[in-house]
Image (tube, rainbow, N blue to C red):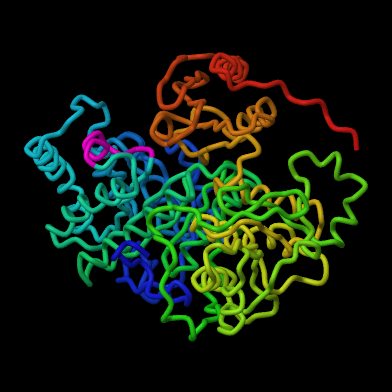
Amino acid sequence: MNSPLRYCPDLLNYSRRITREVKVGHVGIGGHHPIRVQSMITSDTRDTPACVAEVLGLAEAGCEIVRITAQTRIYAANLENIAREVRAAGCQVPLVADIHFKPDAALEAAKWVEKVRVNPGNYVDKKKFEIREYSDSQYAEELERIREEFTPLVLLCKDLGRAMRIGTNHGSLSDRIMNRYGDTPLGMCESALEFARLARENDYHNFVFSMKASNPKVMIEAYRLLVARLATEGADWNYPIHLGVTEAGDGEDGRIKSAIGIGSLLADGIGDTIRVSLTEDAIHEIPVAQALAAPYNECSLKTNAQASHLSPSYDPFTYERRNSSSLTLTDHELGGEKTVRVFTTQERWNALAHKIAGMGDFKPEIILEKSGVVEIDPRDESAVAAINRETEPRLITVADGLDLEVIHAFRELAFRIDPRHPILLKDTLHPPSGDTDFIKALLPAAQNIGSLLCDGIGDAILIRGETAPGQSLRLAYNILQAAGTRIFKTDYVACPSCGRTLFNLQHTTQKIRAATGHLKGVRIAVMGCIVNGPGEMADADFGYVGGAPNKINLYVGKTAVKFNIPEAEAVERLTDLIREHGKWVDAPPPAAV
């Protein structure tokens, strides 16, 4: 590891990061408390009955903290009515006001709810690029202006016993931060730390941090860097962490992306409260979040006491693929900079043989039993030494049946064996013998393989936790896509619906998928409003953003190019825009099976 920063005591042994306790109403976050599950309602904040019904439904489903948008002071004022009716119904779930641009909305909301979320990138700070190059004095002037605007909220939260989340988003950093640090994990951390220092100046400590991004690699690096930076600031900077992947999307893709980002950090002991952001009814987020948190709340993880002396073979703060040598196996190249390949077993290949020609992008590529892969226990020094004496590169994997967590086992393998040997990743070291539940197989597979891919480890992957042959292959390819490792279809960045949304996100996302799902390597953002619009789209090629009720703005990158398009025409106009920029191809005819 090139960086002296450390975000985790031991990359080969699980231990949860120790934090101070933050109280959100009666619910404790961090400290000795379990990982808390959050969500956000989608109703208009001015509609009291709808908001109350949604809060009660989420609480009944197991949601422990519920967020509500408060985009202006008028919206924030109705939080009084929502909170009163929720409590009258006998529900004590803490409520959080989601604030972006309006300090006056935050001050109003803090009167009525247990927690306020602010985004340093657009709370007070400028995002108009009026100044392209900030001098030190101009930078200091902006910080003083932020102090004047932010301090009243800090003092009010302190007086009322409210909690706060200082929540940075990758796509909504301010002009000042972008100028000095760029659109980077470092910029995200600095933005949050500036606000945290202002809170601490007033002896206010009842806050948590978040570093959310739609790209799991960026999100993972930002959270790791934040935790490392907090450690260097001092022992009393031990604030809890809220985890989330912004705009994860819907269905299988949204769950996979969330599992990669959230799950990989939980596996390293980071995270005290989580929200899975799906473009679906919010109630569907709860079981996914509960499933991701369960292994860590149950403390059922295995440890590897022998491994603590090993040094990492990569920098966890900067992505770089492990520098293995290339091999050719059954006409497929892997290793080095070659494509990460998808393996299957001989039994599954046989089950699919009659329809492989029609499987499109989900084809199996290499059969495990014919690959010559060498399986070893990475703790076995003699086996490791034997591999490292080999003059030619060999495909290596971790042996089945070991009493190790998957992420730790493959990290140790990467730390011990010579980099020239490519690695085959597995989602589990204990493959099931019978049928499996697809979602229960999906989450650990995405977490385990996705986390390793985001660390640059892995030249091929094998899914066995899902026993259905076709579904296991689809899952493998979708994990590669979500990790940004192998792009074979359109990538969608779709925000979860909330009270700011100006159109039906779920319906619209499905329409856009139907029209564009065949475009390989094109990234399309579907955003419900301007708040989750040009900034939150991050590195999307095209954007579909709610500009006004029933009116859509279309973007190329972060630049709006079409305005106020009637919603009924907007999907067709989006496809026209993709054509204009040379990224359109006609959908192929369905393959005969």
Give the magenta part as a residue range.
171-180
Q: Give whichever of 88, 208 is nearer the camera.
A: 208
Specify the quadrant of the image occupied by residue 409: bottom right
Q: Name the chief secondary structure element in magenta.
A: helix
**Residue 313 visible in rendering:** yes
Q: Give whichever of 202, 76 is nearer the camera.
A: 202
Q: Residue furthest left?
A: 137
Q: Position of residue 137 (x, y in %)?
A: 6, 38
Q: Position of residue 498 (x, y in %)?
A: 48, 39
**Residue 90 visible in rendering:** no
Give the quadrant of the C terminus: top right
Q: Is residue 429 left or right of residue 50?
A: right
Q: Give whichever of 111, 167 is nearer the camera.
A: 167
Specify the quadrant of the image occupied by residue 131: top left
Q: Give whichever of 535, 71 is nearer the camera.
A: 535
Q: Position of residue 104 (x, y in %)?
A: 23, 38
